[in-house]
Amino acid sequence: MNDQDKLTLKEMCEKFDVTPRTLRYYEYIELLQPEKEGRTRYFGSTEMARLELILRGRRFGFSLEEIRQWLELYNQDPSNVTQMEAWLEMSEAQIKELELRKLQLDETIQELNTLRIHTKKVLGR
């Protein structure tokens, strides 16, 4: 990979819409491992792909520790079979969790709407 294929910290922040603090934290907890030249960090295609997976995992509601463990599986089995099997298990559990949260949110919204209707009636609106 040549230097033109690498992004600086600032460029990574712009490309992925994250803060420098976020990238430094992901580096600190060893989710990302950019190359360093002095104080400058360079992120190659592997780090860009990892960040994309991290951000997607966060959007799906996974913890950083779950994401870290899942990414580590790739280092142990570059064929991705272990990683894909783990992903299937993790995603199934997460879908169940999200469906439960959705049900709870729907119930809360219904309760709030009922209370609003009752309050409007009391106020004569």
Image (spheres, helix red, strand yellow):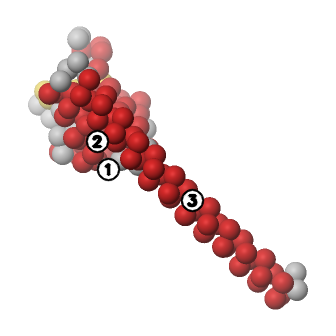
For residue 50, say whether it is visible. no
Residue at 87%, 81% (x, y): give it: 125
In the current view of this chain or complex, which residue is farthest to the right? 124
Which residue is the site of mark 1?
63
Give neighbour class at mark 2: few <14, some 14-19, many 20+ (Cα, 10 Å).
Answer: many
Residue at 23%, 11% (x, y): give it: 1
Which residue is the site of mark 3?
103
* Residue type at numbered disc 3: Leu
Question: Image quadrant of residue 3?
Answer: top left
* Residue type at numbered disc 2: Ile
Question: Image quadrant of residue 40?
Answer: top left
Q: Which mark is residue 67?
A: 2
Question: Image quadrant of residue 36?
Answer: top left
What is the secondary structure assignment of the residue under circle 3? helix
Position above or below: 51 against 65: above
What is the secondary structure assignment of the residue under circle 2? helix
What is the secondary structure assignment of the residue under circle 1? loop
Instruction: Estimate the x, y position of residue 38 in percent, counting from the top left.
Output: 11, 31
Find the distance from the CA under tag 1 to the CA under tag 2. 6 Å
Find the distance from the CA under tag 2 to the CA under tag 3. 25 Å
Q: Nearer the viewer, mark 2 or mark 3?
A: 3
